[in-house]
Amino acid sequence: MAVRSTLESTRKMTSLNKISAIESLPRELQFELLSFLPDSTSLKAAALSCPSLYISFAANEARLSKQAVLNHIDDELLNDALAILELSNLQEWTERNASEIVSRYIRHGNSFALDITTLSQALAIGRLHDCVLYFTHDFVAKALETHQVLPIDGTYNPFPGSSEISQNESVRIQHSLYRWNIFCYLFGHVKKAPVDLEDHDKVFEMFWSRFAPWENEQLACLFDYFHKVLAPVFSKIVDRSNSWLGFMGICGQARHLVIHYQALKGLERVRDILAASPQRLEDTHFFGYKAGDHKTEYWLKHTFRHAHERNPYDIYLKDCDEDDEKAKIKPPAFSDPDPGPEAVWRWAHQSNRAATWALGQTHKPLRERGYVMWDLARLNMWHRFQQAWVWEDQRETLMALRRQKVEATEILERRAKGVVSWL
């Protein structure tokens, strides 16, 4: 264990200093102190701080590591974290056992045992949860900022409201981020996936069909969000690097493929990219992607929409009676104490056919606002339900195409002049 090698140098340094009050405490009290630390990173730091604490830690590693996870992660999210841990430890990576894990994941209550015996396991869970917290804060900031910028129903209206989110909203977004990571394990590039990404029927059967449409819209919000945060990174790479310019083109499809490929590697990978230095980003080996890797990435741009276009029901939501809803709308897999996500989904899809009840391209402007992530009180404060929703995406799509052409022209002009920058 790496901790043991570090301990030797720690012991030598400590022997030169006076013994601290903590070191002189009985082992039982040292254990109690270690069990109150807020996370596994703090536990590791404390264990390495002196030989006495390390001995107390080593004698109770399993109990302390388990307690560090409990201290770090809310009870409502523990099942999500443990599902990821089980997926990461899965030895026989087959469609059957992966499907069984998804089935256990969506059951009510904690379906996964807190089987943590080492600090390394606790650290792995802690790193992922830190990523979940980071992206929760960033998603909220960008979604609420978008509410101040994007018009709805054709008129500009700066929505009032606090940037502080409720506990329900925080847990809902974190829960969705964990579910995104589970999706990445099942169909993405965290490790070799058991299901071919292009097998849309299997993807729908194993995953999308098990969740309510507003729960699937929550993942679609995250997909749009990850594309939004990664796109500027790759724009800068293309602007600066000759090798990336030749590979990805000025603003062609290849850039989107690389973004999708990286997003499917999971939360920790996306965070690594955002934190990487410009020099590291220029190295194509850092991304583990080559020009022949388009097969499984191309479909991701439309994967959400394609999955639900396979919905066999050709009916409008507003025309559904009680029997239709029971037969055609999947109930939520997870209980939500607030009716906001379902209410706003119904508001936005009243005039839509079943094939676009979730993950449709026309609702992308709403997903940029994270519309299915918020509590009913916030939605009411934004006056969401006072008028029917109208699709304004066509105008925004045309504006985006114009911006893309301007970007391409500017890049060509800078490179023709020999100017390379990260502006």
Image (cartoon, rainbow, N blue to C red):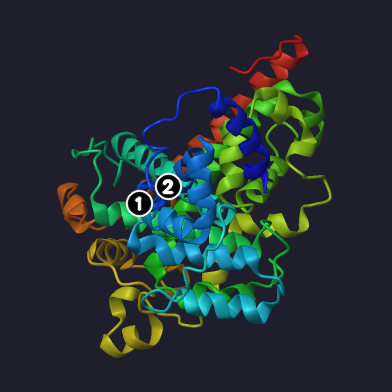
The Cα–Cα distance between marks 1 and 2, rounded to whole angstroms, is 14 Å
Between marks 1 and 2 in the image, the one whose residue lies nearer the viewer: 1
Q: Is residue 304 visible?
A: no
**Which numbered dot is residue 7?**
none
Residue 178, position as x, y percentages in the image: 47, 58
Labels 1 and 2 touching (C-beta < 8 A) = no
- Which residue is more in the foreground, 5 or 420? 5
Is 90 displayed left or right of 364 in the figure?
Answer: right
Q: Hey, which quadrant is residue 334 in on the image?
A: bottom left
How many residues crowd around disc 1 within 10 Å: few (fewer than 14), some, or many (20 or more)? few
Q: Residue at x 33, y 34 (%)?
A: 149
Residue 311, position as x, y percentages in the image: 50, 78
55 in relation to 88, above or below:
above
* Quadrant for the C terminus in the image: top right
Q: Which residue is mark 2?
A: 39
Q: Of the two numbered discs 1 and 2 on the same chain, state the one appearing first in sequence.
A: 1
37 in relation to 122, above or below:
above
Identify which amino acid the numbered label 1 is placed on: Glu
**Which numbered dot is residue 32?**
1
Residue 123, position as x, y percentages in the image: 54, 50
Callout 2: SS? loop
